[in-house]
Amino acid sequence: MLLGMERVLVEDFFADGSTDARVYSPSKRRFTARHRELLEQRERPSSSWAESALSACLRRLASSVLTESWGVGVVDAWTEGDETFCVVYRWKDFGSTLGLRRVRPTQPQVGEATDAQWWGRDVADFDIGEPLGTVAKRLRPGADGISWWGSPGEQTPVEPT
C-alpha cells in the first residue's frame, strides 16, 4: 500500500489469529495479508523459472526456521520476464522498506544450483532471512521509497501495474 511515496506495511495476520504486531519471534512470525495473497496466487506450479523461484521463496519465508525469516514482512512480490523476481519487504530491525531483485544465475558459483526451487529457498533463507550487514551501506534508493539491493539493474525496479 502506498501512502505518498512511502510503502506502509499493514501487518494484520498472525498464525495464531492475534493482531499484536509489536513482538515477533520464531513462534510468532511476521506474516502479512499480502504475503498470504501472494502464496494463494502461486498455488499451482509454473513453467516460468522466475515464477517457480518466487513461489519457493515466498513459501520458504512463511515457514523457514533456518534463519530469521520470522522477522520479515512481505509487502509485495513480482516477476520480470522469465528469469528475474523481486520481493519488497520490511525487516524487523531495519527502519525502511527494502527491495531485493534477483536474476537467474548464468554461471553458478561452486555449490550453487540453478534449480528454481532451490534458488528461491536459498534467497529466502540467506538473502531476505538474514540481517543486511554491510549490504545496508550499498542500498540503492528507488523513486518509490524502497531501498533496493541484489541485482537492481540500471534502473531500480518498479512494481508492475
Image (cartoon, rainbow, N blue to C red):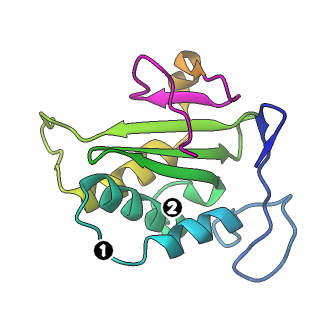
- Say which label, 2 or 1, has the lower sequence index: 1
Look at the magenta stretch and give its main secondary structure.
loop
- Choose between 72 and 81: the one closer to the eye: 81
Q: Is residue 67 above or below residue 38?
A: above
- Which residue is identified by label 2? 61
- Which residue is identified by label 1? 45
- Residue at x-position 31% and y-position 62%: 52
C-alpha span from label 2 to label 1: 18 Å
Which residues lie in the magenta part? 142-161
- Residue 72 appears at what percent x and percent y? 62, 53
Task: Tell how many labels.
Answer: 2
Q: Can the viewer see residue 103?
A: yes
Secondary structure category for the residue under label 2: helix
**Which residue type carries mark 1?**
Pro
Q: Can the viewer see residue 31?
A: no
Secondary structure category for the residue under label 1: loop
Residue 21 inside the magenta-drawn segment: no
- Residue 44 appears at what percent x and percent y? 36, 78
| Quadrant of residue 14 within the rendered picture | bottom right
